[in-house]
Amino acid sequence: MSELASVLVVDDNVEYAQNIAEILEISGYATAVFSTAEDALPLALDPRITLVVTDYRLPGMNGVELVRQILSQRGEVKAVVISAYADDATVLAARQLGAVFLPKPVDFSALGRVVSPST
C-alpha cells in the first residue's frame, strides 16, 4: 500500500493517540505514536514525517513547544495541536506557529480536512 503521508501522533493518553492513529491508518496514512514530546522529537525531524498531531498538555515539553522545535528545523511540516483544556493563550500560541488547533474530543472530519493533501 502506498502511504499518503507519515503522521506522528503524540499524546500521553496512549489509547487516545492510538485511536487517532488507527483512524488515519484506515485512510492510508503511516503513523507513529509517542506519549512524550521528548520521545517524538527525533522522529519528527525525519523528512518522511509530514504531519504532527500533538496534545498540548504532555509531561515535560508541551505540544506547542514540540511544534515550535519541529518547525524551526522543518518548516514544511503541518501541525495540529489538540487539547481538552484550551484557553485563549494556548490556541493563540498554536495558531501563531501556523498550527491548527482542535479541541478534544477531536472532530475526525475536521482532522481529515487538515490531513488531506489538498490543504
Image (cartoon, rainbow, N blue to C red):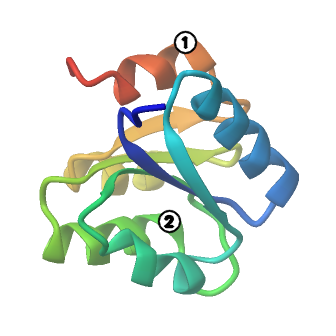
Residue 100 sits in which quadrant? top left
In the picture, the disc for residue 63 is: 2
- Residue 87 seen anywhere in this rendered image of the structure: no
Q: Is 32 or 75 nearer to us in this picture?
A: 32
In the rendered structure, which disc, 2 or 1, sits on the residue that comes first in sequence? 2
Q: Describe the element under mark 2 as helix, strand or loop.
A: helix
Residue 4 appears in the rendering:
yes
The vertical placement of 117 against 57, above or below, is above
Counting from the top left corner in percent of width and height, residue 41 is at 44, 79
Judge left or right: residue 65 versus residue 34.
Answer: left
For the C terminus, the image quarter is: top left
Q: Residue under label 1, please give it.
A: 109
Residue at the spot 62% in from the left edge and 19% down from the top edge: 107
Instruction: Report the disc number at residue 86.
Output: none
Farthest residue toward the top? 109
The structure residue drawn at horizontal position 34% and vertical position 21%, both measured from the top left corner, is: 116
Q: Give how far apart the Cα atoms at labels 2 and 1 are.
A: 21 Å
- Kindly identify the residue that appears in the image at 46 percent across and 49 percent down: 7
| Residue 8: % across, % down | 50, 56
Name the foreground residue: 5 vs 116.
5
> Which structural element holds mark 1?
helix
Q: Along the line of sight, which residue is nearer the eye, 25 or 80? A: 25
Looking at numbered disc 2 in the image, what kind of residue is underneath it? Gly
Q: What's the residue at 49%, 36% (across, down)?
A: 29
Residue 69: horizontal and vertical position, in percent? 29, 78
Number of marks in the rendered image = 2
| Mark nearer the viewer, 2 or 1 | 1
Q: Position of residue 44 (x, y in %)?
A: 38, 70
Which residue ends up furthest to the front in the rendered image?
A: 1
Q: In the shown orientation, is residue 69 left or right of residue 20?
A: left
> What amino acid type is highlighted by mark number 1?
Ser
How would you rate the neighbour count of disc 2 (Cα within 10 Å): few for under 14, some for 14-19, many for 20 or more?
many
